[in-house]
Image (cartoon, coloured by chain):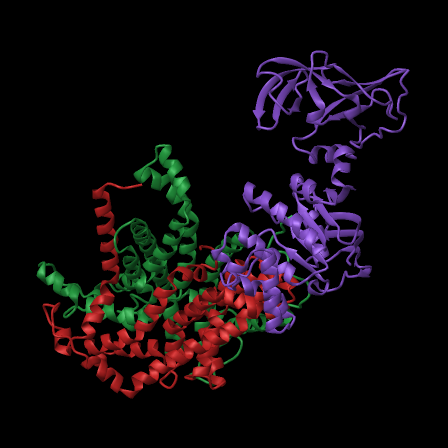
Chain colours: A green, B red, C purple
């Protein structure tokens, strides 16, 4: 007799069109207009510096793009950054989540401290790390290295992409922690007790009960983080500005440089299309997972 | 079940250890904010020092800091209020009067969130330029509203869906039409959820850095973009940087802590609760 | 005064028909109980009367006026929900007064009406509490109070007692019967519990598969179920239903059960020789006796205090239950014979419908 809540209305007497229209129209414009323009610009010769240049050039921007080593460098950097941060944030985030799921005094406060970095604006976290911690002369890490007699590392000169990755990972570990912890706490305690009765404990309990329970949340963490990580920008902008050379230039940063520093609109738009395609590959799987969830 | 003492000690050490490591950069920044400039770059680093409020005074004395702070407030609160005004009716309709296409609509809204900002940087920049919206607060308000609208609608939707349908049906029999159901029942029943949604939207807008860096110059610059200007060598005053940063993240950190448990569903589009 | 008339009411969800043409005339001040297994459409029927579901086709009239398209709050009825559906953020008094507030009734009048209802339901000490601070039984009473305050012509109840424990359920049942007497209103009550149906109803409506199976006073339905479905649904423990074949001779009719045993029928049914039939015997009409026509082994004996249920596995493998007032008539494992009083035998044809006992009664001698 109970009808599926998501398919049956509370009453047929109101028209939902006026309620939905503002959102739908706004999002439709927000989605279509910039996308169409990006596609259009990507097939134009269009430079903000040279007003005389113009006209339809078909796929020539894409041809230039795909013969430009900068693109592949940026793509490789993007993939390294995204993959590295994903692995770090899921592994460390899982460790934090499991640790915070235990009973110990001050657990609530520890939890607050653990998730705090997520709420720090990207420019601030980038500057704290760049200056207070990773500065080659006055930074805390340099001091620690000197004290221990180790060579001092100039992080952003020697390991630019890795250093950016550390900052970004520090921001996203709390996200993974928060979601995995929430998921852990929804684990049926009776199921754990039953598994204990069946003789599973310690790592085996984790391997056969906890991890399968977390599998879906981990998938969601990976997909959502990927979407956001593909757009990492401010951390690079503030720390390395893509350098030295192109060592830490990712796709978003490359597009920014070409568009707003070189004013080459056509080229940048073609890059934008690549970024959109890349994000949508991930988005496809994410949307499928989440919409599946709606059918419950 | 009572665990052995060693296990409990290990749990406490692991939990607190990780928490302190994660929080350390923020703690270090907070300490630096109370140091004098020479102390901030001293080697060895100072753990004990005489705290001073001078950095905060200097930061706040600069009239422009408050200007940027104010911009952040206007942009994040403004975009959130606008987003709620647009999103609340939509979430209500989707949760309680779903048509055949409600699910498709929700998924489509979600997919608009997947558009990478950088993919549309060029057209947005040019459109803002031609509309005179570059470096304007109203431009950022509208933009952030659009960016966060799918999250707002989804999060509200998941909260609305938890209201037992029978309560609204009872209200219907009691003579409350949709608008009054909304005012007398839904708003009070989901107030905590609406508040969390608003807080998440404020947090996301407050911390947004891509558009604020690229679309503002000074007039509408919020704190994210202002702090970015400290990256230039001449801005290298660590104590003042720390003080300005602490003021910039303080309120948002508190908001985040307040609403941490509800954030998850907004950030995962209801997939994890 | 309130009659409710259902005329060929149907409900479709897409291509799925859940209510398949229901006709029912509910009289003024009648206590009607819709009973049936879950999924039979009884709740959908109630929700259509309430106006919470649209009626796909057919006419619904209250006091002779067609109300298909009238808003729920203008139909002059009140509903008590299974989950009570109290407003958790309002006090008991505000919950009960909400409908009056929506109708724009002045505050003083509202308060006096709430107080009257609270007195009837012994809720006066709780008026300032929130629903969350009340016990299940108290919440139930608030839900009823919310209905009473509106002074409706018709009360609708959707499985109101199913969330209460057994003792409380019995107490609320009595209270509901008392309320019906005091309020003098028409009540339509949905349940899957046949005990509630038997004890509360003026008339029971047995619903099955979206259709009305039988309408009648409780004892009438108990005595003359029209189908094996009703026979099995009304009465606890369940009626024993035994399948067999009809064998008619010139002067007698017998049911030959699967194990070959023969049960003599009181009448010669209008059926062909060899037709599949089902005989129904209430547990209290079955008795252990040495010259019984059925044989079986006792598997379980349940002592309920005032009565005893003896479960017997018949030679055919079918199970039968015997209800006796006193001690068990046999021990577990014992083989017994069961006797049937032909006058208390129910007979159902191949389609599961009851075969009339009055027609073609065999004249003895």
| Residue A199: image location, x then y, percent | 34, 32
Residue at image location 38% in from the left, 32% down from the top = A198
- Is residue B201 visible to us here? yes
Above or below for C327 versus C59: above
| Residue C186: image location, x then y, percent | 73, 54
| Residue A238: image location, x then y, percent | 29, 73
Q: Is residue C1 left or right of residue A190?
A: right
| Along the viewing direction, whichever of B62 and A276 lies nearer the viewer | B62
Where on the picture, by quarter, is residue A24? bottom right
Where on the picture, by quarter, is residue C255? top right
What is the tally of numbered marks visible in this picture?
Answer: 0
| Along the viewing direction, whichever of A204 and C279 lies nearer the viewer | C279
Residue at image location 35% in from the left, 63% down from the top = A73
Above or below for B109 versus C156: below
Above or below for A46 versus A252: below
| Along the viewing direction, whichever of C303 and A144 lies nearer the viewer | C303
| Residue B20: image location, x then y, percent | 23, 59
Residue at image location 8% in from the left, 59% down from the top = A149
Q: Is residue C358 left or right of residue C76?
A: right
Q: Is residue A152 left or right of residue A242?
A: left
Residue at image location 64% in from the left, 64% down from the top = B174
- Is residue B102 visible to us here? no
Above or below for C296 versus C51: above
Q: Is residue B183 left or right of residue C158?
A: left
């Amino acid at each position: 007799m109970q009808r599926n809540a998501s398919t049956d209305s509370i009453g047929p007497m109101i028209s939902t069109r006026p309620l939905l229209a503002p959102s739908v129209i706004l999002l439709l414009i927000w989605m279509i207009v910039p996308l169409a323009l990006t596609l259009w610009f990507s097939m134009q010769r269009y430079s903000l510096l040279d007003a005389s240049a113009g006209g339809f050039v078909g796929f020539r921007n894409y041809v230039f793009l795909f013969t430009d080593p900068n693109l592949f460098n940026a793509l490789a950097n993007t993939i390294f950054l995204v993959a590295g941060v994903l692995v770090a944030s899921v592994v460390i985030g899982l460790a934090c989540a499991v640790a915070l799921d235990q009973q110990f005094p001050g657990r609530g406060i520890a939890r607050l401290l653990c998730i705090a970095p997520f709420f720090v604006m990207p420019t601030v976290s980038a500057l704290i790390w760049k200056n207070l911690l990773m500065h080659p002369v006055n930074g805390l890490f340099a001091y620690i290295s000197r004290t221990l007699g180790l060579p001092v590392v100039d992080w952003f000169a020697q390991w630019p992409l890795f250093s950016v990755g550390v900052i970004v990972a520090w921001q996203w570990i709390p996200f993974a922690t928060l979601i995995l912890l929430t998921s852990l706490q929804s684990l049926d305690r009776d199921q754990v007790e039953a598994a204990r009765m069946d003789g599973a404990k310690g790592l085996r309990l984790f391997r056969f009960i906890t991890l399968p329970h977390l599998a879906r949340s981990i998938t969601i963490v990976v997909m959502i983080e990927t979407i956001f990580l593909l757009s990492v920008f401010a951390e690079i902008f503030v720390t390395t500005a893509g350098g030295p050379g192109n060592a830490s230039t990712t796709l978003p940063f490359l597009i920014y440089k070409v568009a707003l520093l070189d004013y080459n609109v056509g080229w940048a738009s073609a890059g934008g299309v690549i970024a959109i395609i890349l994000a949508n590959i991930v988005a496809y799987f994410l949307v499928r997972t989440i919409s599946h969830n709606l059918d419950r | 079940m009572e665990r052995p003492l060693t296990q409990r000690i290990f749990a406490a050490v692991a939990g607190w250890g990780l928490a302190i490591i994660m929080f350390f950069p923020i703690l270090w920044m907070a300490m630096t904010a109370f140091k004098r400039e020479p102390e901030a770059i001293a080697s060895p680093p100072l753990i004990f020092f005489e705290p001073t409020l001078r950095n905060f005074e200097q930061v706040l004395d600069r009239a422009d800091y408050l200007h940027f702070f104010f911009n952040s407030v206007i942009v994040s609160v403004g975009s959130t209020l606008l987003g709620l005004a647009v999103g609340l009716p939509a979430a209500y309709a989707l949760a309680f009067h779903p048509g055949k296409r409600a699910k498709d609509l929700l998924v489509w809204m979600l997919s608009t969130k997947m558009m990478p900002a950088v993919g549309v940087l060029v057209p947005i920049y040019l459109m803002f330029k031609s509309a005179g919206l570059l470096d304007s607060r109203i431009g950022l308000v509208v933009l952030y509203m659009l960016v966060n609208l799918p999250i707002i609608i989804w999060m509200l939707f998941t909260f609305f869906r938890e209201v037992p349908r029978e309560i609204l049906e009872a209200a219907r029999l009691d003579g409350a039409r949709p608008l009054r159901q909304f005012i007398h029942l839904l708003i009070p029943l989901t107030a905590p959820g609406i508040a969390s949604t608003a807080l998440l939207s404020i947090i996301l807008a407050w911390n947004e850095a891509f558009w604020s860096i690229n679309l503002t110059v000074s007039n509408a610059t919020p704190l994210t973009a202002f702090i970015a200007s400290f990256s230039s060598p001449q801005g290298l005053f660590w104590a003042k940087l720390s003080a300005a940063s602490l003021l910039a993240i303080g309120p948002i950190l508190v908001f985040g802590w307040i609403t941490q448990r509800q954030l998850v569903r907004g950030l995962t589009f209801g997939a994890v609760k | 005064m309130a009659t409710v008339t259902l005329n060929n009411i149907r409900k479709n969800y897409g291509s799925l028909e859940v209510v398949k043409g229901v006709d029912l005339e509910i009289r003024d001040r009648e206590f009607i109980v819709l009973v049936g297994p879950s999924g039979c459409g009884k709740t959908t029927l109630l929700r259509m009367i309430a106006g919470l579901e649209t009626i796909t086709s057919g006419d619904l009239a209250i006091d002779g006026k067609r109300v298909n398209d009238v808003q729920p709050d203008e139909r002059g009825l009140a509903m008590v929900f299974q989950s009570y559906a109290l407003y958790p953020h309002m006090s008991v008094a505000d919950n009960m007064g909400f409908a009056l507030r929506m109708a724009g009734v002045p505050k003083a009048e509202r308060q006096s009406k709430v107080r009257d209802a609270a007195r009837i339901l012994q809720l006066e000490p709780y008026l300032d509490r929130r629903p969350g601070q009340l016990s299940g039984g108290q919440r139930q009473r608030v839900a009823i109070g919310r209905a009473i305050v509106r002074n409706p012509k018709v009360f609708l109840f959707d499985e109101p007692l199913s969330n209460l424990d057994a003792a409380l359920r019995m107490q609320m049942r009595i209270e509901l019967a008392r309320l019906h007497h005091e309020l003098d209103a028409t009540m339509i009550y949905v349940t899957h519990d046949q005990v509630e149906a038997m004890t509360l109803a003026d008339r029971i409506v047995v619903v099955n598969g979206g259709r009305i199976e039988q309408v009648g006073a409780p004892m009438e339905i108990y005595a003359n179920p029209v189908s094996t479905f009703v026979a099995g649904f009304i009465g606890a423990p369940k009626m024993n239903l035994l399948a067999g074949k009809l064998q008619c001779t010139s002067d007698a009719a017998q049911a030959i059960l699967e194990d070959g045993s023969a049960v003599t029928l009181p009448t010669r049914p209008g059926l062909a020789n060899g037709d599949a039939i089902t005989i129904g015997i209430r547990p209290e009409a079955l008795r252990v006796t040495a010259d019984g026509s059925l044989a079986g082994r006792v598997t379980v004996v349940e002592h309920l205090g005032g009565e005893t249920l003896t479960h017997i596995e018949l030679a055919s493998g079918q199970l039968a239950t015997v209800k006796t007032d006193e001690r068990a008539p046999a021990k577990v494992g014992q083989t017994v014979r069961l006797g049937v009083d032909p006058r208390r035998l129910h007979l159902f044809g191949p389609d599961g419908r009851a075969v009339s006992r009055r027609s073609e009664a065999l004249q003895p001698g």
